[in-house]
Structures are given as structure tokens and as C-alpha cells.
Image: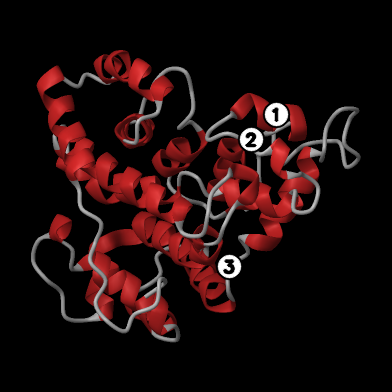
Amino acid sequence: MPPTDSLATAEHRTPPAGRLLSPQAVVDAAERLAAPSPVVSGILRTLDEGAAPARAISSQLAASPELTVHVLRLANSAMFGQRVDSLERAVVRIGERTLRAVLLAASTYRLMEGPLPVYGLPRLALFRHSSEVAETAQSIVRGQSGAYQGQAYLAGLLHDIGKPIIAAATAGRLGPEAALARGDILAEHELLGTDHAQVAGWIATRWSLAPDLAEALQHHHDEQPPAHPVARAVWLADLVVWAGNGDDDAMHRLPDAAQACGISTDSMEQVLAATKGAEAPRRPPGLTDRE
């Protein structure tokens, strides 16, 4: 499916004066780094053909143990209720829209786990932040409409996927003194003519993710909350997580942001308490960071 947004249709391959890269150079980096594996490409083609039987999709998934684990884990999570005992049933349970997002999350994990010096982030910092946003977005949606829990979690997990793309595209071009602050959309535009939210939205379009997921990725830094409940939950969750980590701007914006999302003060305090009080998961012995 060809990209259709302003990022993907950028005209300049040579960056304008004052810009480090052209938007097209960022698109090229995104195309290269977020390219699906052969197994994922085959599954996406099957999905694009329409009315694909679950058996055909599950047989393709079975070629990748890592993807199989992701799908089974999500299908058997609390948000779906009763457990399933086969990959085919897991595919039916989570559905096409969620399956596409799971495939993207699994395919881009390697990008999320690495250090991002241009953003001042050490290894695994982005993945931890995205995981916190995912859990918080799921909590927000659960309090309003439990039907969107799965989408909210996946959108939160993927919302900053544009950052490692931009970091890779600018590797060796920016020194430590030019490090981009978290979510500094204006600085990204000055340097690149685009930003990590637009890049994430482009990737969502490229992978044919559901519109609510694409909206969440592309608009999580908007001034006002997006319209769809999933996008709105991720938008607010990102602020909640930054506020919980002591970010002054996020703490200042949070009360009005919660009100704009229809979240009561009591409900917001419960979400904040859960975010601040969450313990880091204890690592069982013998596992690596990725495991």
C-alpha cells in the first residue's frame, strides 16, 4: 500500500538550507529499518488479499517461533478472557487489525531496545517508556470502554517508533550538544522538516494498520487530544508517564489534558498513583535484557 501522507510525498531529496536531512531521507530510513521480514511480508500479503482463513495465517506464523509467542501471549492475556490452546484460535481471537500491530511491534523491537544518543536515551529507555505508556493507555481505556484495551496497549507500545528511525537517519550527523529533547517536535522540524510522530504515522500507513492505531501514533504530541478513544488514551498516557517521572511541562498540562479527555480528578489520581507506584519487573535468573 503506497504511503499517502505529507511525509511520504516530500518533494526534496536535498535538504533545504538549515535542515540536516530532507523528509525523503527520513522516509528512506523508515522504509529500510521498518521493513517486514519475509515471514511477516508473507502474512501481510495474505491479509491484504482479504478473507484469508485463520489456518493459512497460523501456518505462516508458525514459521517464526518469536511471532508465535507474541500472538499466543496476547490472545491469552487478561483482556481477552478465556484462554486459547492453538495458534489458529489465537489468530481468530485477536483479529486482523490487532495482528498487524503485533507484527509491527515484534518486527521493530530491535529498534526500540537500542540506545538513542540523539534523544539522550540509553539502551532500553525507549522500550521502558513505551511499555509504561502502553500500560497507562490500557488503564485509561479500561475506565471508559474496555473494548479498546488491546488497541490502546499496542498503540502505546508503538507510539514512539519514529524516534529510532530518526536516530538512525541522523547517525553521525548530530553531536551530543544537538541532542533532541523528549518530544521536541519543533526541534525535529527545524532539523528535518518532519518529526517522529509523522514518521510513526507513515509507518502505520505503510503497514496498513487500523485507522485508530495510525491516528494514535501520528497525533500523540498534538496540542489537543485526538478524537478516537485509542488515540486519545495514548495522547493522555504519554503525558501521564512524563508527569509521573517529574517532567514539569507534563505536570503543568496534565489537569487540563485530563479534563479535555473527560477524565475525572479521582480517576486521574488513580491512574497517576498506579503509574508512580508501579514496580519494575523482577528479572528471573539467567535471562538477558531482551528476554
- Colouring scheme, one of rainbow, by chain, secondary structure, one colour: secondary structure
Looking at the rendered structure, the secondary structure element under dot 1 is helix
Could one spot residue 217 in this view of the protein? yes
Q: Are marks 2 and 1 in contact (CB under 8 Å)?
A: yes
Residue matched to label 2: 195
Residue matched to label 1: 189
Name the one closer to the observer, 152 or 221: 221
Q: What residue sits 59% from the left and 40% below the top?
A: 196
Residue matched to label 3: 36
Name the one closer to the observer, 189 or 210: 189
Q: Position of residue 45 (x, y in %)?
A: 54, 68
Q: What residue sits 52% from the left and 36% below the top?
A: 218
Indicate the amino acid at tag 1. Answer: His
Q: What residue sits 40% from the left and 47% below the top?
A: 129
Indicate the amino acid at tag 2. Answer: Asp
How far apart in space, not on screen, are marks 1 and 3 (Cα)?
Answer: 27 Å
Indicate the amino acid at tag 3. Answer: Pro
Q: Earlier in the sequence, mark 2 or mark 1?
A: 1
Q: Earlier in the sequence, mark 3 or mark 2?
A: 3
Callout 2 crowding tier (Cα within 10 Å): few <14, some 14–19, many ≥20? many
Q: Is residue 107 above or below residue 125?
A: below
Mark in the foreground, 1 or 3: 1
How far apart in space, not on screen, are marks 3 and 2 (Cα)?
Answer: 22 Å
